[in-house]
Amino acid sequence: MIVFVSGGARSGKSQVAEQRVLSAAGDANCYYIATASVYDVEMADRVSRHQARREGQWVTLEAPLAIDQAIAQVPDHHAVLLDCLTLWAGQVLFGAEPNEEFSDEQGLALLAHCLRDAQARGLTLVIVSNDLNEELIPNQPATWRYVEFIQCLHRWLAAEADSVLEVIAGCAMEWKR
């Protein structure tokens, strides 16, 4: 099962997604694919808050870019949370490391590969991403490229997912079931 969870910044989407994974996992381990790269104090604080919320049932796999390799480490028929697609997309386009940038097509192909792998192995894959249409977008070419890419990923993912949720102020609305 593929679940797409979207919402504005700090809307509570990670908590909603974590509950979906916990429900799907039962007593089994839950896997958390962390795409964040800690680059400043604020990001370190956010990562610490997310980690503190997760209990011993969670296994964290850090994958700023190689989400396919992280998903490959998850045992068949388990539940996994990818948090978040927004950070991953920026690293795809602009490189987490020098010379690691991908084209839009390569990024979409990598995400598609992850979904197919998850489906083939019976994983419950919950993917979190920010809805960037809720904010004013600066008039800069790189920013517009990023927004176009993430919205392309969102449209594609919403079409492919079994369930699509939008989180507003901690409340989830299921748009596709």
Image (cartoon, grey):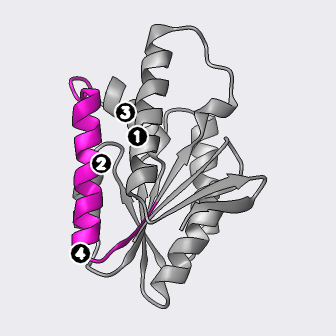
Upstream in sequence: badge 1 or badge 2: 2
**Label 3 element class:** helix
**Label 4 element class:** loop
Indicate whether 40 appears above or below 177: above
Report x, y in % for residue 127: 46, 57
**Label 1 element class:** helix
**Decide: marks 3, 4 in contact (CB < 8 A)?**
no
Residue 111 is tagged as 2
Report how far apart the C-alphas of labels 3 and 4 lie in the structure.
26 Å
The nearer-to-camera label among 3 and 1 is 1
Q: Between 64 and 45, which is closer to the camera in this rendering?
A: 64
Indicate whether 26 appears above or below 134: below
Indicate whether 46 appears above or below 22: above
Measuring 26% from the left and 79% from the top, which residue is drawn there? 76
Measuring 27% from the left and 56% from the top, which residue is drawn there? 114
Look at the image and give the residue range highlighted in magenta. 98-126
Q: Which residue is mark 3?
A: 91
Q: Which residue is mark 4?
A: 121
Amino acid type indicated by mark 2: Leu
Measuring 45% from the left and 42% from the top, which residue is drawn there? 155
Amino acid type indicated by mark 1: Leu
Residue 66 is tagged as none
**Decide: marks 3, 2 in contact (CB < 8 A)?**
no
Report how far apart the C-alphas of labels 2 and 4 lie in the structure.
16 Å
Q: Residue furthest bottom?
A: 27
Report how far apart the C-alphas of labels 1 and 4 lie in the structure.
22 Å
Amino acid type indicated by mark 4: Arg
Amino acid type indicated by mark 3: Gln
